[in-house]
Each structure stands twice: as structure tokens, then as C-alpha cells.
Image (cartoon, rainbow, N blue to C red):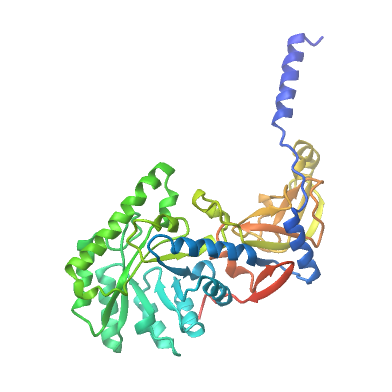
Amino acid sequence: MVSRRTLLIGGAAAGALAWARPPEASGTYLPYFAGLNTLLRQQGIDRPVLLIDLDRLDRNIDRVVKSARSGTPRNYRIVVKSVPSPGLVDYIAQRAATRSGMVFHRPFIQALARLRPDFDLLLGKPMPVAAVASFYAQHRGTFNPARQLQWLVDSPERLTQYLELAQGQQLRLRVNLEIDVGLHRGGFADPQAAAVALKLIASHPQQLEFSGFMGYDAHIMGLPGFLSTGEIPKVKARYAAFVDDLHRSFAQLAPPSLTFNGAGSPTFRHHEVDSPLNDVSVGSALLKPSHYDLPVLADFEPATFIASPLLKRHASTGLPTQEWLAGPLAAWDRNKADTLFTYGGNWLAQTESPAGVQRADIYTSSNQEGYYAAHGVALAVDDFLFLRPTQSEAVLLQFGDLLAVRGGQIEQRWPVLQPSL
């Protein structure tokens, strides 16, 4: 006979299991995504696409411009790697009234110099001297590098390489010095180290022109909150020390037109007051992938989504070779009752709509990504699963033309920059 104690223990165990059982997450499209799904199906879209919501993008651009104009106005520079499409860059530039870009890839420098010859371009990272030589060997057109292109230099050794190239090819290079503002990503560690480079520039005016400083500080926001808050004024003070030493010791290299660039999507708002910067770079905040869900960007809106057609949906059959587990697994977690497969996958992105769809790790694939869902998740074959990118620069290059949508219509189709030339 089963004892009362055994019954109580068994009942408690059953209750604990029931409490631990994952709750069912069955959902339908939010109205916003239902409208996008209808649009894509009506337009006959038959592959994964990257959508840009123009209304949301407009509001995000306006927020960046408002910040750049707050306090002492700063020039706004578009980070091209985060919005790597000439059409998208043009759209942002027109609304923001800027012709300044930051570039991180030699083929992108080449393309923008050809396609947007009125832009001022600043490198966001130092290039191998071979890349500098390749640019000049291939450059054609009206873009004038001697006036419109700032090469980034992070060490005396690299500056010497650039100088030798300029001497050998009769070039005059504009040089912006990368400075370490405390994140130790490279660059000149202090004004004394930068002075070595400034002296070399001053002694070779035919080949080198000093164009300013660049001090990237966005990764401060990757620190714990109490550390990042205290570090922001220190970053400004370190940057200001470079500017002060420049004016004190190298006044001949310091016309009013110099570029003192810095910030980034997570930190540009911290430079609205008491900042030595006159030039701020922002890119990802305009589209707000999920990596930028930060308190400082709480008012920014996600403006880009992946839409992938659903190819297959069927009742889950358990793990391959262990099909007998299908019933127990679905009974325990009703969110794995169905298995779904989309067109493409393995992107840097998270499922967004409809709610209740989760990745099936066993079916990770760039060809047909597998997902699980409860029976009640409203997603049929040929509907679109929407995902939100975690970042923008790599993801936007994976889908061909970007689809710019507004008011239930595809307003623009923007080709992306080619990563190689």
C-alpha cells in the first residue's frame, strides 16, 4: 500500500514539474508585421530580403541631427559600414544635410569616391599601405583625395610608410591621427606620442597634411554601467589634452578646418556638452539593430528587419534517429510541437514576429534554417518570418538590394556596396 508520505512527495514532484514546464507561446503577427507580410506576398517576393522602414529611419535621422546641433554644433558624419548602400547613404545625407562619411574598407572608399564625388571621407581604421597604393592606382574621376580624403594613422611606423609612398608617387596625403581615449584599441597613447607624428608631418609639407584627430569611444558602453558613466568625462579630458597640446606646440598645423572626430552610436549624445569634438560619427543607431538596445538610445526605433519565406511546416518528429522522443518532447514543451524551415538563415538576427518562433539549434543552416513553434503560432507556408538583426554592417550586405518601405509600399530598391573590387 502506498504511504501517505509517498503520495505527498509524488504530488509535490508532479507539481514542481508542472510549474517548471515551459509556458506555451502562441502568437500571431503584430499589425505592423501583418502589413509587411501582405505587402511582400502581394509583390511576389520569393526570397529573403532586408527591409528598411523609411518612416522610422526618418525619425532616427532627425534624432541624430538634433543631437549634433545641440550645444556647440558638431558636424554629423555617416558611418558607411553600418548603412552600406549608396542609395541609403544618399537618403540619410539628404535628410541630415551632410556630405561627410566614415569608411572602413578600401573597396568602399573606391566606390564612394566614384559614386559620390562631393563627399568628404574619413577613414575609420588605419589601412595597410598596400591599400593606400591600390586606391591611388585605381582612382579616377573628380573626387580630389588631396582635399576630400583623410587617411587614418595610428603609429609613427605607419606614418613613415605613408610618407614613403607619397614621396615615391608624388602624392600629398591628408592624415588624421588616431588617438587612444582610454579603450586601448590602438592609436597614439598620449600627446607626447602624437607629437612624434606631428613633427614628421610638419617637416614634410609637400607630402603630408595634418587633418585632425579621431578618438573612438563607443565601446565605453560595453563596460558595466557604473564604470561607463565615470569614464565619459575622462574620455573627453584625454581628447582635449591632445587638442590643447596641438594648439600649444604645433599651431602651424592647426587651422580652424581640422576634424576632431569621435563618438559612435552608443556615445554621440554624451558629446552634446563639454566636448572637444567638432565631428561625430553615427551609423547603426539610424537602423537600431538589437545590439543597440541601450538606455541612451531608448527613443530610437528599430528600422530594419529580415523577412524570410517559410518553406515547410510539420509536426515535430523528435530528434533525428530518436523519433520516439517526439511525443514526450512536445508534451513537455508545447513550443516545440511543430518544426519550421525558412528560406536561408544563420543570420546575425533574432526572431521578431510572429511571437513564439524559436531557433532549432540542431537545424542551424544558411540554406534552410530550422525553427520550433507551438501549434497555435499563426505562420503558414509562404508567409514571412521576420527577424531583427543584431547588427547592421555585415547583415545588410547579405540580401542583395535593400527594400525601402513606407505606407504599405516598396518605395525604393537600393543596391548595396560590393565588398571587393
Question: Residue at (64%, 70%) from the top-left corner?
Answer: 399
Question: Residue 59 location, x and y as percent?
Answer: 58, 62
Residue 322 visible? no
Residue nearest the viewer, comparing 25 with 333: 25
Q: How many labels does the image show?
A: 0
Image quadrant in which you'd find residue 105: bottom left
Image quadrant in which you'd find residue 94: bottom right
Quadrant containing the N terminus in the rendered view: top right
Q: Is residue 376 above or below residue 417?
A: above
Question: Residue 146 location, x and y as percent?
Answer: 34, 84
As drawn, the residue found furthest toward the front would be 71
Residue nearest the viewer, comparing 335 with 239: 239
Residue 300 visible? yes
Tell me: 259 left or right of 51. Answer: left
Image quadrant in which you'd find residue 281: bottom left
Residue nearest the viewer, comparing 310 with 109: 109
Tell me: 183 left or right of 311. Answer: left
Q: In this view, does 74 lie above or below 370?
A: below
Tell me: 12 left or right of 153. Answer: right
Question: Residue at (28%, 56%) from the top-left corner?
Answer: 238
Tell me: 69 left or right of 355. Answer: left
Question: Residue 344 location, x and y as percent?
Answer: 69, 63
Question: Residue 68 location, x and y as percent?
Answer: 44, 63
